[in-house]
Image (cartoon, rainbow, N blue to C red):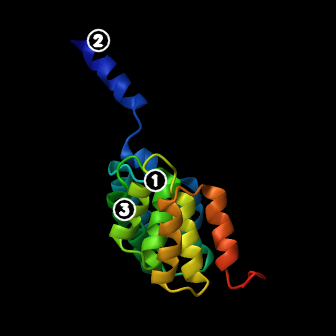
Amino acid sequence: MLRLAALLLLLSLNQPTADVVAQDPRLAARLDSVTRVQVEAVLTAAHEERLPLEPLVQKALEGSSKRASGPSIVAAVRTMRADLQRARRSLGDRASTDELVAGAAALRAGATPEMVGRIRRAEPDADVAVPLAVFTDLVAGGMTVDAAWQSVSRLAEEGGDDQDFLDLRERLSPRSPSR
């Protein structure tokens, strides 16, 4: 019985827990202890939901770099987690980290969850991070959400590859000499 208990203890020590995963030395170096604990709680919840942690850590570090207050940093990290959750619901459980980050950005830029899901359905076996990023870039460049969506979704339905989407962005970008 003692051997079994020792074996179980040894096995449990080799399994990373959410708390261990959530601890990041970059956060300890840059955030005050109260903010760090709150951000780590968000990271722990995100880990349990199988969301990528690095975008959340980067959001916290960005806030620190901008000298944002602790509560503002925590709020921004929580918002990013919610955005990643929405992107996951739209893109599905198999979505990669890049797809989730691009999906979250597209949602923040004005895409609806239905739009993001339609990109996935148009290209079910392809990585859709680039089309979503191009959509976001077009909106950020001044295009309306509807116009950007029409351009990107049409190309997705036609089976465009990453280079086609990058070319589309160049053609439609306000800085592009072809406009």
Residue underneath mark 3: 117
| Mark 3 element type | helix
| Mark 2 element type | helix
**Residue 137 in view here:** yes
Residue underneath mark 1: 123
Name which of mark 2 and mark 1 comes first in the sequence. Answer: 2
Name which of mark 3 and mark 2 comes first in the sequence. Answer: 2
Of residues 18 and 122, which is closer to you in this image? 122
Query: Residue flagged by tag 2: what amino acid is it?
Result: Arg
Q: Residue at x 52, y 51 (%)?
A: 127
Determine whether 113 is above or below 17 in the image.
below
Residue underneath mark 2: 3
Q: Nearer the viewer, mark 2 or mark 1?
A: 1
Q: Looking at the image, do the residues carrying marks 2 and 1 touch, with CB atoms under 8 Å apart?
A: no
Query: Residue flagged by tag 3: what amino acid is it?
Result: Gly
- Separation of marks 2 and 1 at Cα, in angstroms: 52 Å
Q: Nearer the viewer, mark 3 or mark 2?
A: 3
Label tally? 3
